[in-house]
Amino acid sequence: MAEVVVDGLRIAYRRRGRGAPLVLFHGAFEDSRVWSGELGRLSRHLDVIAWDAPGCGESDDIPPDWGDAAWAAAASGFLTALGLEAPTVAGFSLGSIFALLLARHHPASVGRLVLVGAYAGWGGSLDAETLAARIASVEFTLTHPVEEWA
């Protein structure tokens, strides 16, 4: 794995191929390994870069108070550290949120945006009680070992 340092944060990534750059952002509870098949196929025609998002895989953990602007700055800094100017950025699931934040906060950093299994917000589709229960479930999952999930 290769790595760059962005604002003191080590970000690991996998890179393969030549051609126009394609940056891949993985989903929640994943890392760049989820893109292994795509790295092989797409690298025949593209320069494919798959990051381990901060806090995932071999990248450094993030501070607990990180917000949208910090995620966007990390993604933009990652692209800059690799010398990429407005590459195609593809995000899957949670990675689509990172891609959207990057495009929102640093629009010049993104040439094309590809969102797969994207999520853009609840839009009021859930009542407050159901939403609170889902948030509590996610928080529990993130703060307890797998053995306690049952």
Image (tube, rainbow, N blue to C red):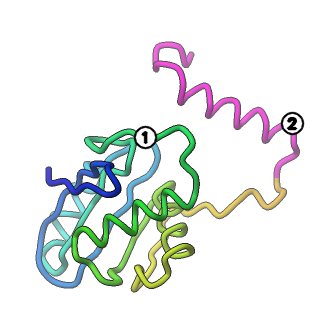
- Residue 139 among those drawn in magenta: yes
Which residues lie in the magenta part? 126-150
**Residue 131, quarter of picture:** top right
Q: Amino acid at mark 2?
A: Glu
In the picture of the structure, the residue carrying the numbered disc 2 is: 129
x and y percent of residue 115 in the render? 49, 70
Going by the numbered disc 1, the residue's amino acid type is Phe
Residue name at image x 32 percent, y 41 percent: 60
Task: Please tell me the numbered disc located at residue 116.
Answer: none
Which secondary structure lies at badge 1? loop
Q: Residue at x 27, y 60 (%)?
A: 50
Task: Give the structural element (helix, strand or loop) at label 2.
Answer: helix
Q: Where is residue 129? Give x, y as percent.
A: 86, 36
Task: Specify few, some or many for label 2: CA neighbours under 10 Å numbering under 14, 14-19, or 20 or more.
Answer: few
**Mark 2 or mark 1, earlier in chain:** 1
Which class describes the residues within 10 Å of circle 1: few (<14), some (14-19), or many (20+)? few
